[in-house]
Image (tube, rainbow, N blue to C red):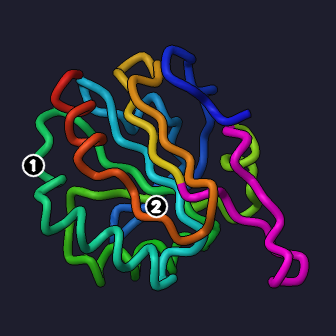
Amino acid sequence: MPPIEGETVPEFEALLCDGETFRSTALSAALGERGGVVIATGFAFSAIAQNWWKQFVRAGWDEFEDVAVLGISRDGPYAQNEFLRWLDEPGFRFFADVDGEVSESLELLADRDHMADVSTPWRSAFVLDADREVQYAFVADDWISPLPREEIEAAVAEL
């Protein structure tokens, strides 16, 4: 079962991309002083990911004070960096979950029936405090639902 409010997200380490470089980074090291918003999407350049992340840019999520905005997707670091350059938002970073281990540790990994031998994380968002405790959790029960952006923003304001 994916993390729920009040639980602590397990520590993981993966390549963290910033639009130019990437290096192996622990989740706890990537969070801001107050915590972070962790968003899982299947693939960086999917239509849904493009739509969501452009909305986050327009909503000013790069201006969250001491709160990191972190994506997780199954793309490799070069694709992640290209996506971040496409977004033109230097405040966002992405974990490259190429092997699915991060998604699996969060119990989000799901087989995609229409995509042979492919699994992706359920589209989801978690607001974490600086100790990785979940303050807000959303896991979509389908592949196209939008994220509850206002609820996420309210949870960030409470950090």
Say which of 135 and 95 sits in front: 135
Q: Where does the image place residue 114, in percent across and percent down from the top left? A: 82, 83
Residue lying at the far right in this picture: please name it: 117
Q: Where does the image place residue 151, in percent across and percent down from the top left? A: 28, 40
Judging by the rendered image, the residue that carries numbered circle 2 is 22
Q: Please determine whether, in this image, residue 91 is positioned above or below residue 28.
A: below
| Count of numbered tags | 2
Which residues are drawn in magenta?
A: 106-123
Q: Residue at x 43, y 61 (%)?
A: 17
Type of the residue with mark 1:
Glu
Q: Callout 1 environment at 10 Å: few (<14), some (14 to 19), or many (20+)? A: few
Q: Is residue 95 visible?
A: no
Comes first in the chain, label 2 or label 1 = 2
Residue 63, disc: 1
Question: Where's the C terminus, which quadrant?
Answer: top left
Cα separation, mark 2 vs mark 1, equals 22 Å
Relative to 149, 119 lies left or right: right
Type of the residue with mark 2:
Phe
Q: Is residue 16 magenta?
A: no
Q: Is residue 97 visible?
A: yes
Q: Secondary structure at mark 1?
A: helix
Relative to 138, 109 lies left or right: right
Q: Secondary structure at mark 2?
A: strand
Q: Residue at x 23, y 47 (%)?
A: 150
Q: Magenta stretch mostly in which secondary structure?
A: loop
Say which of 15 and 66 sits in front: 66
Say which of 149 and 129 sits in front: 149
Relative to 56, 25 lies left or right: right
Question: Where's the N terminus, which quadrant?
Answer: top right
